[in-house]
Image (tube, rainbow, N blue to C red):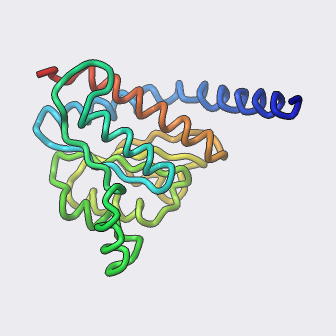
Amino acid sequence: MDDVSQHLQESIRAACTTFESLNELAGPVARAAEAMVECLCAGRKLLVCGNGGSAADGADFSAEFGCRFITDRRPYPALNLAQGGSLMSAIGNDYGYDEVFARQVAGLGQKGDVLVAITTSGNSKNILRALEEAKARALMTVALLGRGGGPAKGMAEIELLVRSETTARIQEAHKFLLHVICGLVDARLPKA
């Protein structure tokens, strides 16, 4: 039991350290929320992409807009690009896995939309390609990053860089930041 208690205490300390560092992201979080409010109020949509745990975070984030976050309101369009197994496997098979999000951005993205790219490392080539495609199509880009940002650093207009080297802590912080953004956006969106 001592091993479990020690591991739990170390994990809590590491999570607290990571979360305390998020204070420096207040400005980018506010800009991301404002960009999403402008997008949705203009009748545009959010496109969200990520791999693995980041895809799961993206699924939750997009669901908060399609359903509701805390208060009841009308649904808003937010599409998780990682949820379509048939489409992703077709694109992966025909064009390569690096293109699974970029092809969807090309087909769905329009000027005024917002792409939210979630990656713990910043190294995922399919995320890099999605950011490139979004830029080419004049979408606003928001990237949630970790580990120094990798090659994705500098590719998005708004970056939320979690200062941790541990995937679990980065994912926890990303989930938290996405929920903070949901709350900020929800407070500004029309309810009906």
- In the rendered image, the vertical position of residue 36 relative to residue 143, given as above or below: above
Residue found at x 15% / y 54%: 110
- Return the residue found at the far right: 2
Name the residue at the front extreme.
1
The image shows residue 67 at horizontal and vertical percentages of: 25, 33
Q: Is residue 3 left or right of residue 41?
A: right
Residue 6 vertical placement versus 135 (above, below): above
Q: Residue at x 27, y 18 (%)?
A: 71
* Quadrant for the N terminus in the image: top right
The image quadrant where one finds the C terminus is top left
Q: Is residue 83 above or below residue 157?
A: below
Task: Tell me what residue is drawn at x 40 percent, y 30 percent.
Answer: 29
Q: Position of residue 45 (x, y in %)?
A: 19, 44
Q: Residue at x 11, y 36 (%)?
A: 42
Dividing the picture into quadrants, the one containing residue 64 is top left
- Would you say 141 lies left or right of 76 here? right
Identify which residue, 78 or 177, lies in the foreground: 78
Classify residue 190 by image quadrant. top left
User: Which one is in front, 152 or 107?
Assistant: 107
x then y, percent, for residue 138: 20, 54
Q: How many numbered marks, from 0 up?
A: 0
Q: In this rendering, would 73 be left or right of 178?
A: left
Q: Nearer the viewer, residue 4 or 124?
A: 4
Q: Residue 96 appears at what percent x and percent y? A: 39, 77
